[in-house]
Image (spheres, rainbow, N blue to C red):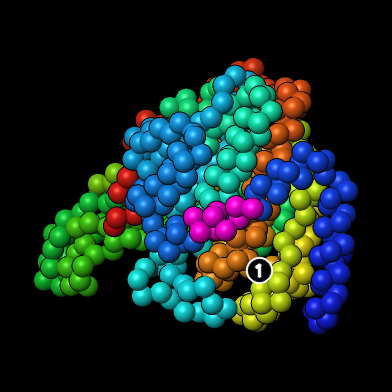
Amino acid sequence: MKYPQRYSWGVTLFLMVFGALLQAQTLSTEEQQILKGLDDRMDQYADMAKAIWDVSELGFMEDQSTAVLQNKLKEAGFKVESGLAGMPTSFIGSWGSGKPVIGLLAEYDALPGMSQAAVPYQESRSEVNAGHACGHHLFGAGSVAAAIAIKEWLEKTGTSGTVRLYGTPAEEGGGGKVYMVREGLFDDVDAVLTWHPSQMNASSAESSLAVVGARFRFYGIASHAAASPWNGRSALDGVESMNHMVNMMREHVPPQTRIHYAIFRGGEAPNVVPAYAESSYYVRHPNAATLKEIFARVVKAAEGAALGTGTRMEYEMEMGYYEVLPNEPLSQLMYDKLKQVGGVQYTPEERNFAVEIMKTYDHGKMTPESAMEIAPYTVNYVGTFASSDVGDISWVTPTASLAAATWVPGTSAHSWQAVAAGGTSIGAKGMMVAAKTIALSAVEIYKNPAIAEKAMDKFRQLTGDDFRYESLVGDRKPPLDYRKN
């Protein structure tokens, strides 16, 4: 349902009351109690998210952020283990015993260069350079809120089952989940329920793009670029030759392929033949097996570039994520619960903020009221856009996700507008939509373990009997210093 952009606050109030009444009719008394418990503590969880937003720590350096989440779980009675899989800021918080084991995910890393105040116009914060342009402060706090609500229900009802929250650092390029999967930390999990901040509310069975990232380093010989260039061998020539060959290769790879690169080092001065140059590549495709073949050709291009320019080349795998493997039984469950929970309803002040910030980007036909809507359920097994290290988890256990409107409708991820809204009550409200949906979904699985069994049957059908998970990054250690440079 679409609403005109100009309308009276009375109409909004009517919609809010009508929506609340309709929601109450579709929720059981038990479910209403779970949601009320989350609502009663919304301010606590919003404060947690804001504390993480304030410090905006980069991947593998989220010391204060991970402490906020771990401390809250410990206060709630969870057993917390930290520093897992070689990552100091990772953790697992567990409560309960027996099956089913349901895993939740928490992210908490920010993006560099995205400093922004919680205002509807562009204004950086002097105290930080980074910002939560992907909303991971909300991701972490919302998942903790869900985990505690689930724990309290298990405890109150005496139901058998385990809730486990995984603190996964450095999603933005560091791929923390990959190393936790590689360590076997998800092997006994029956289902993973997760979410991500967004500009809309949705839960569908959709895939993503598999991705590998690598750093290519070329070593040449320095010399005076005018007096004796013949004595030099340009490392920059190696980088540029590789780029040229890869760009020609684009015509001869599957059309769903995405290849992008950046030159990190290209020399120090024009009159010195560069002895060192460096570039970083991301290669994506909807299928991890096909991606491996394409990346091998990129490496061949780098080897050829080094041979042709008389330089030496080394490359280092920086990351590698599988495509997300959709799981329809779990996704349908989360969609049904999201419909029961409903979307985000703005106060007059929040709507004014939304109106102002929407003036700064093209939002199409979306209005502030779009935050109340739930997108239709869809199924798509071919990834078309982003990549996530959640993909690796989905290939070792059934996994489903939802998106919640933590940003003003029409907002792009990784934008200053996302940082701004994420620092307000708009972000907190979207976070609680996610927490409520995950909590209700998990409780439904505990009450009806057949849902988890059906999800596992679908998982095994899609992976096949012969599939064995192998990390795309091989045996490399987590790149703990990847944000330090």
Q: Is residue 301 left or right of residue 285?
A: left
Residue 13 placement: quadrant? bottom right
* Percent x, y of residue 184: 47, 25
Which residue is at 55% across, 41% downward?
105
How crowded is the residue under tag 1: few (<14 C-alpha within 10 Å), some, or many (20+)? many
Establish if 303 lies above or below 245.
Answer: above
Depth check: 379 or 147 in front?
147
Q: Over which residues does the magenta segment extend? A: 40-48
Residue lying farthest top? 465
Q: Is residue 64 left or right of residue 246?
A: left
Q: Is residue 289 left or right of residue 241?
A: right
Which residue is at 75% across, 73% downward?
367
Say if the magenta span includes residue 157: no
Viewer can see residue 198? no
Say if the magenta span includes residue 44: yes
Which residue is at 73% across, 52% downward?
202
* Percent x, y of residue 442: 68, 35
Viewer can see residue 314? yes
Return the residue at label 1.
408
